[in-house]
Amino acid sequence: MLLSLHALACARFALRHCFAALPRPAFPPMSTPSKQPSLILPVIGMMLFTFLAAYMAAFLTFRQPQQQGPGSSGPYGTRTAGFGAESDTFDKFPLPEFSFTAQDGTTFTRNSMLGKVWAVDFIFTRCPGPCPIITRNFSAFQKIMPQEPEYRLLTITVDPVNDTPAVLKEFGENMGANFERWTFLTGPKDPLYAFIWNGFKVVAEDNSSEANLPMEEKFLHSVKVALVDKQGNIRGYYDGTTMDAAAWTKLRNDMLRLGAE
């Protein structure tokens, strides 16, 4: 919002200076009619263009999902922990207790995660934006991640009303998910969003009531992959949209490192 106000202030500043730059009329002798073309219309056009450009910049800046920082407040509480360096493990942040539903209809809790190392992402199945990229990356990562049963993938929806267990199961099948190693999770929206905000320390925002928004803006969420150790602690964050094979190899190696702890 501060950025949008700043952009509008810049537009008003540009307007004032454009008006100041308008040429003062020069009165020629009565016997010599002026042949100079008027500069007023081009200058007015330039001012309107400047104002509209500044307004659109402010609007687009305001509409961008803002990644929350340490201690920032959101609709589901104040986040008390921050991010570690991307692709590195860092101080342990324990996940809270929770109980949600997996794609097969079974209950999935914090205890379900204990004793295993998890890579966790956040998507919604109707997403036309980054979600297909993240999910395809996870699907490919299945083939290179450690093959022992204690290494798992977890996908959490941010659109739980639409993404029922049956929808998540079909989505996972279409993406080639091995459900013995890859779990899809849904649940009631408010507890689920509180878990994402306060447990994983990342943003989730439901804008689905705004009818005019495109689908990719209906649900705003992090594109990070969280790394969770065998004790249920968050240990790192990684870019879920990257196509860099080295980054996914780094995640694999970090999973192995946590598995050996």
Image (cartoon, rainbow, N blue to C red):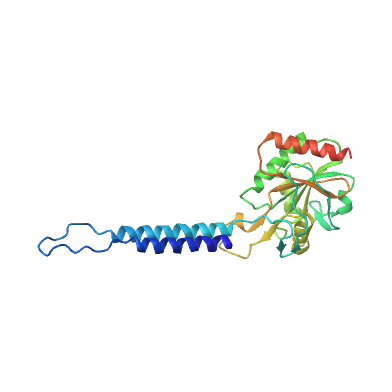
For residue 115, above or below residue 78: above
Query: For residue 159, what is the image quadrant?
Result: bottom right
Between residue 145 and residue 49, name the one nearer to us. 49
- Residue 213 visible in the shown view: no
Between residue 211 and residue 171, name the one nearer to us. 211
- Residue 3 visible in the shown view: yes
Query: For residue 180, what is the image quadrant?
Result: top right
Coordinates of residue 234 in the picture (x, y in percent): 81, 49
Numbered label tally: 0
Looking at the image, residue 188 sits to the left or right of residue 2; the answer is right
Coordinates of residue 165 in the picture (x, y in percent): 77, 54
Classify the position of the C terminus by image quarter: top right
Between residue 73 and residue 182, name the one nearer to us. 73
Q: Residue at x 48, y 60 (%)?
A: 10
Coordinates of residue 175 in the picture (x, y in percent): 70, 43
Coordinates of residue 2 in the picture (x, y in percent): 58, 62
Between residue 222 and residue 6, name the one nearer to us. 6
For residue 242, above or below residue 103: above
Q: Residue at x 76, y 35 (%)?
A: 143
Q: Residue at x 9, y 62 (%)?
A: 31
Classify the position of the N terminus by image quarter: bottom right
